[in-house]
Amino acid sequence: MVVIPEGKEYTYALRFEFETTNNEAEYEALLAGLHIAKEMEIRELIIFVDSQLVANQVKGIFEARKPAIKQYLEKMMDLLSGFPSYSTEHIKREQNKKADALGKLASMTFSKLVKEVLVEVIQNKSITEKGVADIAKEEGDNWMTPIREYLRSGALPDDPQKARKLHIKAPLYTR
């Protein structure tokens, strides 16, 4: 739901045609809301989120650990960089009855929905869209060297703690 300063509400519901976790659904909804706010040329944004984890990840207080959530957070921060001013607020689920009702509406058949509620069916996760990355080739060893060597040959550092970290981190760099 988008509410402009004059008090006008734009009610919007999403219906996912893919498997998703609660946090992924929260990020999908946030991304959709950011796209709407961008199209409406909104300059100052207050984001209300009923997931304390997601609110704190967006604020930078908590770190995203799961690869998919990291991708969502990166995409979210990229979109937020286009807004001159924004803040994120956590609201308790019981205080967010309108959003809860919209979630239920989105799962109903379209014929039961009133015309005032816009429902968008999303076929694929937002993070599955491919982007273009700038690639810089560096000479010599850098932070990527141990990861590359581990992925190519399974070579681990002698330090057990560094080896453990590399063993955990390296799979994040494969496709």
Image (cartoon, rainbow, N blue to C red):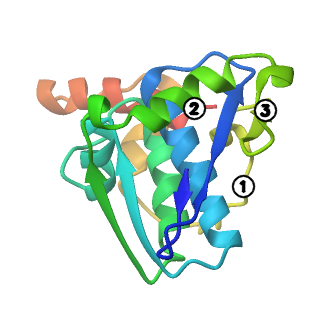
Query: What whole-number distance in Å separates the C-alpha atoms at marks 2 and 1?
Result: 31 Å
3 vs 1, front mark = 3
Q: Residues within 10 Å of mark 2 (few under 14, many from 20)?
A: some
The circle drawn on residue 102 is: 2
In the rendered image, residue 34, in percent from the top left (x then y), is placed at 57, 60
2 vs 1, front mark = 2
Report whether residue 150 is seen: no
Q: Secondary structure at mark 2?
A: helix
* Residue marked by disc 1: 131
Q: Secondary structure at mark 3?
A: strand
* Image quadrant occupied by the C terminus: top right
Query: What whole-number distance in Å separates the C-alpha atoms at marks 3 and 1?
Result: 22 Å
Q: Which of 54/154 is in front? A: 54
The amino acid marked with disc number 1 is Gly
| Lower position in the chain sequence, tag 2 or tag 1 | 2
The amino acid marked with disc number 2 is Leu
In the rendered image, residue 80, in percent from the top left (x then y), is placed at 48, 67
Q: Is residue 95 left or right of residue 152?
A: left
Query: What whole-number distance in Å separates the C-alpha atoms at marks 3 and 2?
Result: 13 Å
Q: Secondary structure at mark 1?
A: loop
Give the quadrant of residue 162: top left
Q: Which of 122/78 is in front? A: 122
Q: Residues within 10 Å of mark 1 (few under 14, many from 20)?
A: few
Report whether residue 6 is seen: yes
In the rendered image, residue 17, in percent from the top left (x then y), is placed at 75, 21
In the rendered image, residue 155, in percent from the top left (x then y), is placed at 38, 26
The circle drawn on residue 121 is: 3
> In the image, what residue occupies the spot 27% across and 57% down?
59
Give the quadrant of residue 23: top left
- Quick check: marks 3 and 2 in contact, CB under 8 Å? no
Q: How many marks?
A: 3
> In the image, what residue occupies the spot 49% across and 25% down?
153
